[in-house]
Amino acid sequence: MHTKLRSIVVDSNLLLLLAVGLWNPRAISTHKRLGNVTFGDFEILRQFLSSFDSVVTSAHVLTEVSNLAGGASGESRAAIFRQLASLTKVLDERVVAASAIADDLEFHVFGLTDAVLSHLCSEMLLLTQDGRLASHRQRKGFDVLTLRDVRALQGQAGHA
């Protein structure tokens, strides 16, 4: 029997990949903010996230995803925003007040959104594309994976 893992917090770039891929997987290769990922990465991300009970986010992360999604134009932009709106209904949105983390080192080094991710990953796994943030949190003993790590895990699972 396969049991799901509890919760995972996902960074803005990967939530953008999820939103664009769920709307139109072919749009991944043309969205200017997704130049470093592929349709295969979307499939790996979608499969990996399905093993969790909840995907956690915050208003700060969603704002950044919305800003990144705004890089599309016309009907594509509207469709990505509709998909993002749909995602917000299934994501577990947590409130982290900026004032609560304003004095944290991560706020001053990485900025608000990554400081929120850093705060949330003290309670759950963090999935990020930001290697610098991942390394920082791993050095502090927190559970962090990058998309590259998930690719490697998926590759190992395929060979098991």
Image: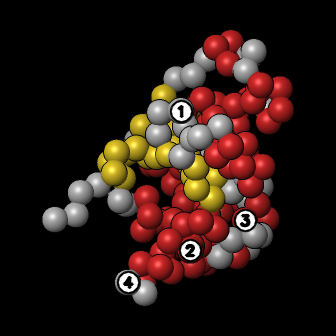
Q: CA distance from mark 3 to mark 1?
A: 28 Å
55 or 124, which is in the foreground? Answer: 124
Task: Kindly report which numbered mark, 3 or 4, lies closer to the viewer in this rendering.
Answer: 4
Q: Secondary structure at mark 1?
A: loop
For disc 1, the marked residue is 122
Q: Which mark is residue 34?
A: 3
Tell me which amino acid carries mark 2: Ala
| Residue 98 seen in the figure | no
Closer to the N terminus: mark 3 or mark 1? 3
Task: Kindly report which numbered mark, 3 or 2, lies closer to the viewer in this rendering.
Answer: 2
Q: Secondary structure at mark 2?
A: helix
Closer to the N terminus: mark 1 or mark 4? 1
| Residue 109 seen in the figure | yes
Residue 127 sits above or below residue 2 on the image = above
Residue drawn at x 68%, y 56% as measured from the top left = 129
Closer to the N terminus: mark 2 or mark 1? 1
Q: Secondary structure at mark 3?
A: helix
Relative image position of residue 106 (x, y in whole percent)? 75, 30
Name of the residue lying farthest toward the left:
1
Residue drawn at x 57%, y 79% as measured from the top left = 40
17 or 50, which is in the foreground? Answer: 50
For disc 4, the marked residue is 160
Q: CA distance from mark 3 to mark 4?
A: 31 Å
Closer to the N terminus: mark 3 or mark 2? 3
